Image (cartoon, helix red, strand yellow):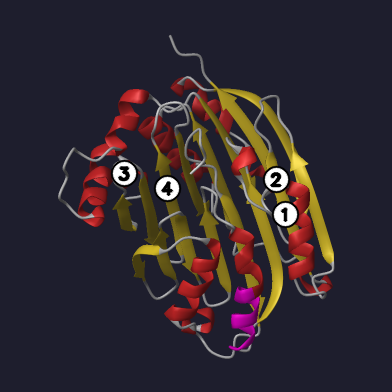
Amino acid sequence: MAASGFEGFEKRLELRFSGAPEKKGLRRLDFSKIEKVLHAVQCTVVSAVGNTHFDSYVLSESSLFVYPTKIIIKTCGTTQLLQSVRPLVDHASTLGLTIRACRYTRGSFIFPSAQPYPHSSFKDEVLYLEDNLPKHLSIKKAAVITSKSPHKWHVFTACGYTTADNYKDNGLFTVEICMTDLDRVLARNFFRRFNDARTGDSAGAEMTDATGIRSVNRNALICDYAFDPCGYSMNGIDGSRYSTVHVTPEDGFSYASFESVYGSREEFVEALQKVVKVFRPGAMSVSTTGREEAWRGVAKALEPLGLRVRSRAADEFPDAGTVVFQTFTTRRK
């Protein structure tokens, strides 16, 4: 916890592997090993659910998704996410898996001076990743995508020669949405009642319904959790697709994030509009990864909701494809 408030902006790490000897792959990892990795990162599991495609964990500081050949981990606050890289690569090797690609992304921290090494700067993060990733991931790129707002998007990718163009994830693209200056009335929905004796799971389920989060994808199996006295996390499972929401509702540093994967612009834009209605942010960014045209139509869809595009920038990354970063702001009366 920073002296000024809680850091909502997450750090996101995605590791992809190859050579799975059998169907379950990384899902065969002992839970005790996962717990040990999370302990090094400085977070714990608070709730979990899975299906035939992947396992989903709600963490004390965001989310973890484990597929047979892919791991996605997001953590917020002052967690040391990159401490997970080397142990996860080592654990995967015991299952006959070899890392083939890494992608690390994050926004601009609200309280950057509170971040411990290696998250003290993007330069330190990149150097740490380069030191802790295997040498065969020799194709690397690190870049900061800027905007007309103070918010920036930091991206690092690494892969081998055989996977440099292998970013087409079954036609899906990844969407990462970061929202600040949440509507104060709507943000109050993410506070627990005084002397609330319910569990985090039952209080979380009530928040999911009361806020409209469940309507974003009614087909998803939702695993949710409400923190005490405030804060909320949710993981959704819809076949092989995941979604996740995290909320820090306190005035002065309110923040909410939404992440998911989509196969078409139409379903993405529909979900985006629903998410904005849940939080009514004063400022937000939308990052799309993996499909160049995924950003089209976003600005037009957000105009009726009072958000106007402030900037748009794009860059290409090995094993990630096109990353488009857009920022939006609104003026409240």
Question: Is 195 placed left or right of 74 in the picture?
Answer: left
Mark 3 vs mark 1, CA separation in Å: 37 Å
Residue drawn at the location 60% of the way across and 81% of the way down = 92
Q: Name the residue beneath numbered marker 4.
A: 245
Residue wearing tag 3 = 215
Q: What is the spatial separation of the Cα atoms under label 1 and label 2, in whole angstroms?
A: 10 Å
Q: Amino acid at mark 3?
A: Ser
Q: Nearer the viewer, mark 3 or mark 1?
A: 1
Q: Nearer the viewer, residue 291 or 192?
A: 192
Task: Report which residue position mark 2 lands on.
Answer: 154
Task: Single out the mark in the foreground, 1 or 2.
Answer: 1
**Amino acid type shown at disc 1:** Glu
> Picture coordinates of residue 333 (x, y %)?
43, 9
Measure the C-alpha gap from mark 1 to mark 4: 24 Å
Q: Position of residue 129 (x, y in %)?
A: 74, 62
**Earlier along the polypeptide chain: callout 3 or callout 2?**
2
Residue 54 against residue 253 in the figure, above or below: below
Q: Quadrant of residue 239?
A: bottom left
Contact between labelled residues 2 and 1, with CB atoms less than 8 Å apart: yes
Amino acid type, mark 2:
His
Check disc 4: other Cα within 10 Å, few if <14, some if 14-19, many if 20+: many
Which is more N-terminal, label 4 or label 1? Answer: 1
Which label belongs to residue 125?
1
The 10 Å Cα crowd at callout 2, few under 14, some 14 to 19, many 20 or more, is some
The CA distance from mark 4 to mark 3 is 13 Å
Q: Please say whether residue 108 is visible from this viewpoint.
A: no
- Magenta range: 87-95
Question: For the residues marked 4 and 2, what is the alpha-carbon distance in whole angstroms?
Answer: 20 Å
Give how far across and how far down residue 220 sits, in percent.
Answer: 34, 57
Q: Please say if 112 is above or below 170.
A: above
Dots 4, 2 in contact, CB < 8 A: no
